Image (cartoon, rainbow, N blue to C red):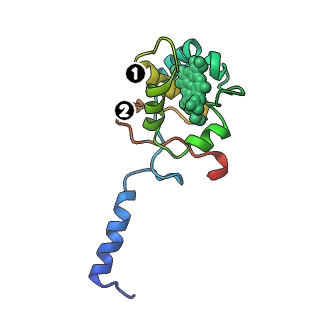
Amino acid sequence: MMSMPPPLRLTVLAACLPFLGATAQPGGGPLASYTTTQARAGEEAYRDVCATCHKPDLAGASDTPQLAGDTFLGMWGGRPATELFAYVNAAMPPAGRKPDAETLMNVVAYILKKNGMPSGRTPLDETAPGIIAPAARDR
Ligand code: HEC
């Protein structure tokens, strides 16, 4: 068997290190995790605060973007869930009473659920590294 010269062997090892220990996804990095408790609380808050515009089924309307489905995932799939939270926390709802950050994090968990992502034991929070599932056509 041919053996690689030592410097090359080191390069190969270094190139592989970032991928060790994570469940790799084609979109890059592990999927975001949330708990069923978060999603349940998020559903309630979503109905209170978001559903008038984005609709109870998250389908959106002519002037309001979809929050679950291929259009949404085409925009947000593969991006960190924390980016989605940062957007929501900064911009949504556009007017009126603003829920606290924990409530909005729960709403993001509910959005992940409605996009077909599985719940897990790790709650979604501002330090979570996970990504949003890529759209079906990109998988
Ligand atoms: C008054 C109507 C209204 C309410 C209430 C509202 N939104 Fe929105 N939302 C919009 C509009 C309009 C846009 C498009 C904004 C833009 O393009 O600048 C938007 C954009 C978004 C986006 C970006 C979607 C994309 O693909 O670009 C997200 C995510 C979002 N809203 C989540 C929420 C959440 C979560 C809530 C509740 C906490 C909420 N919105 C409440 C009207 C609303």
Q: 64 or 7: nearer the eye? A: 64
Return the residue at label 2.
Answer: 126
Left or right: 13, with 33 as reference point: left
Q: Which mark is residue 101?
A: 1
The amino acid beneath tag 2 is Glu
**Looking at the image, is 128 positioned above or below residue 49?**
below
Q: Position of residue 4 (x, y in %)?
A: 34, 84
Q: Position of residue 44 (x, y in %)?
A: 54, 14
Q: 63 or 20: nearer the eye? A: 63
Q: Position of residue 37 (x, y in %)?
A: 47, 21
- Taking the image in four quarters, ligand 1 sits in the one at top right
Q: Residue visible at 63% across and 19% down?
A: 53
Q: 135 or 2: nearer the eye? A: 135
Q: Check disc 2 and report its element: helix, strand or loop.
A: loop
The amino acid beneath tag 1 is Ala
Residue 113 appearing in the image: no
Labels 1 & 2 near each other (Cβ < 8 A)? yes
